Image (cartoon, grey):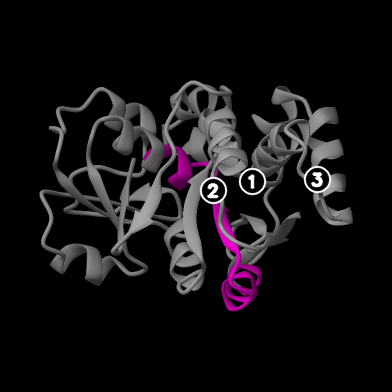
Amino acid sequence: MARYVGGERGAKNAARNGSVVVVVDAFRASTTIAVLVSKGARVVPVASIEEAASADADFRIGERGSAKVAGFDFGNSPTEILTSEIPPDSTVALSTTNGTRVIDAAAGARAILTGAFVNAESLAEYLSRETHGDAGVVVVGCGWEGYRASEDEAAAGAILDRLRSRGAKLDERAGRVVERYLACSRRALKSNNAARRLERLGYGRDLDFCLAEDTVPVVPRLAGGTFVG
């Protein structure tokens, strides 16, 4: 059974139930993690800026309110990171407003993965192929500071739709998320609150990248506190 929940509370409940948790922060943490893993980097997600600043890492990536954290190497921009010279085997500390907090909330889950539009197909293929005992799959939309985010629900719908096509059963809420994803236009997502905030901060180039489906074929998995491919 595959389910959909939202936010930190949903992630905590899924972890307590021993589920496989997929954390979805489409604008932009999950997309950024996918890009970093595709470059061969190891990604250490941390909830606070202080933890990221003091981490034993080669690079520090962070944002608050979508803006780059002062003194860090990069903001949470997947297009910036894609063209950067981050070498394979680098260790990257990452802290974001929503995504890394939800990852932290999912601690103790059977497995923690990250998903977005860019790796929806690869993630669904992995989840349908791997066996996790009797653990269900819970897709968690991060949202924005406790509120729902349409881009996260749509990206979760993309993942759940692909799982359903591979024979997975969805609970009622997950089914509704899929239907909204199928009816949602890219234009609507590019004009929501999160997209307008990114445009104002000069990150408009990230939007098309984050909304492109199946362009970064990796499955970031948390192992020993670090996301690897």
Q: Is residue 53 above or below residue 17?
A: above
Mark 3: which secondary structure?
A: helix
Horizontal side of residue 205 vs 182, given as left or right: left
- Residue located 45% across and 72% down the image: 107
23 magenta-colored: yes
- Residue located 44% across and 49% down the image: 66
Q: Is residue 90 above or below residue 121?
A: below
User: Which marked residue is nearer to the observer: mark 3 or mark 2?
Assistant: 3
Q: Which residues are magenta?
A: 9-32
The location of residue 191, given as percent across then percent down, is 68, 32
> Where on the picture, by quarter, is residue 50?
bottom left
- The residue labelled by disc 2 is 25
- The residue labelled by disc 1 is 152
| Residue positioned most to the bottom | 16
Mark 2: which secondary structure?
A: loop
Residue 177: numbered disc: 3
Horizontal side of residue 131 vs 34, given as left or right: right
Q: Is residue 41 above or below residue 191?
A: below
> Where on the picture, by quarter, is residue 151?
top right
108 or 155, which lies in front?
108
- Amino acid found under the numbered disc labelled 3: Val
Distance Cα–Cα, label 3 vs label 2: 15 Å
Indicate the quadrant containing the C terminus: top left, top right, bottom left or bottom right.
top left
215 or 187, which lies in front?
215
Distance Cα–Cα, label 1 vs label 2: 6 Å
Mark 1: which secondary structure?
A: helix
For marks 1 and 2 on the same chain, the one whose residue lies earlier in the sequence: 2
For marks 3 and 2 on the same chain, the one whose residue lies earlier in the sequence: 2
Q: Is residue 178 above or below residue 187?
A: below
